[in-house]
Image (cartoon, grey):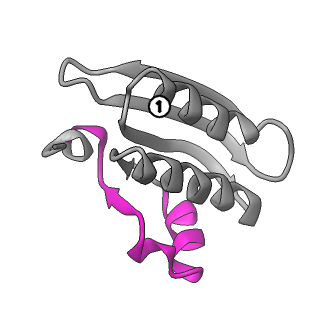
Amino acid sequence: MNIHHEETEQGVVVIHVVGRVMLGDESAQIEKLVGDLLAQGRKNIVFELSGVTHIDSTGIGRFIASLNRVMQSGGQMRMAAAAPIVREGFRVTRLDTVFQFFPDVASACEGFR
């Protein structure tokens, strides 16, 4: 798994995740990065998931933990460009009703408060 981020002109942090988001130390990077960003005052986050090829329950759990931290800080977290296989993982667990999914990063970045 590979992860990197950038900040938009509107102050939204876009985190690009590529590869397999699964059990193991690699996926722990997601929670660590979110925690670091929140500590820096960055509260509006979009995960760009077009490069995610597989996600398991631990991977989904990393996003749940991140969403909880973002919401506790008063921020918002959104998901963008998820492949059908990734969306299915969230749908099966009914978490597609908890997370906000957008077709692309541009639409996910619109309307942050």
Quadrant, the N terminus: top right
Q: Is residue 23 left or right of residue 19?
A: right
Mark 1 sits on what residue? 38
Quadrant, the C terminus: top left
Viewer-proximal residue among 25 and 91: 25
Above/below status of 12 relative to 31: above
Q: Position of residue 33 (x, y in %)?
A: 59, 29
Q: Residue at x 86, y 45 (%)?
A: 24
Viewer-proximal residue among 2 and 112: 112
Q: Is residue 29 left or right of residue 41?
A: right
Count of marks overlaid on the render: 1
Viewer-proximal residue among 66 and 51: 66
Q: Residue at x 85, y 38 (%)?
A: 25
Secondary structure beneath label 1: helix
Residue 13 lies in quadrant:
top left
Question: Within 10 angstroms of label 1, few (less than 14), some, or many (20 or more) residues?
Answer: some
The kind of residue on which mark 1 rests is: Leu
Residue 54 lies in quadrant:
bottom right
Q: Is residue 54 left or right of residue 105?
A: right
Residue 61 lies in quadrant:
bottom right
Q: Which residues are magenta?
A: 83-106
Is residue 80 rendered magenta in the image? no
Above/below status of 110 relative to 58: above
Q: Residue at x 57, y 59 (%)?
A: 64
